[in-house]
Amino acid sequence: MAQKILIVGFLIVILYNLGAGLYYMLVDKGTTNRTVKALTRRIALSVALILLVMFAIWMGWITPHDLGR
């Protein structure tokens, strides 16, 4: 259960940074680099989430299900 909460938390923070990037893009009109920072954080969090899921599968903490069977 804790793994699911952690993954959902990551997804919420990723969506927040995506929204912040959109907001900064509309408000700042290219005068600051807040948009770049928000989108960079989003990419870093996405990569971290993918690596975390891969590590959890490798450790056996979570198991992927086979839809094709």
Image: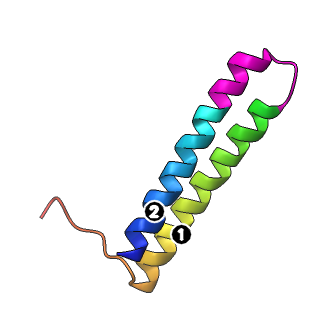
The residue identified by callout 2 is 7
Q: Mark 2 or mark 1, which is nearer to you?
A: 2
Question: Which amino acid lies under the numbered mark 1 shown in the image of this protein?
Answer: Leu
In this orientation, which residue lies closer to the viewer: 14 or 62? 14
Assess whether mark 1 and mark 2 are in contact (beta carbons under 8 angstroms).
yes
**Number of dots carrying numbers:** 2
In this orientation, which residue lies closer to the viewer: 56 or 15? 15
Inspect the magenta stretch and tell me whether residue 61 lies in it: no
Residue reaching furthest right? 31
Secondary structure, mark 1, is helix
Residue 58, given in percent of the width and then of the height, sits at 45, 80
Look at the image and give the residue range highlighted in magenta. Answer: 21-33
Which circle's residue, 2 or 1, is located before the other in the chain?
Answer: 2
The circle drawn on residue 40 is none
Residue in the picture at 52% in, 60% down: 50
Q: Is residue 38 above or below residue 22?
A: below
Quadrant containing the C terminus is bottom left
- Marks 2/1: CA distance? 9 Å
- How crowded is the residue under tag 1: few (<14 C-alpha within 10 Å), some, or many (20+)? some
Residue in the picture at 62% in, 41% down: 17
* Apparent side of residue 2 relative to residue 48 in the rendered image (left or right): left
In this orientation, which residue lies closer to the viewer: 68 or 11? 11
Residue 28, given in percent of the width and then of the height, sits at 79, 19
Residue 16: quadrant of the picture: top right
Residue 68, given in percent of the width and then of the height, sits at 15, 59
Quadrant containing the N terminus is bottom left
The residue identified by callout 1 is 52
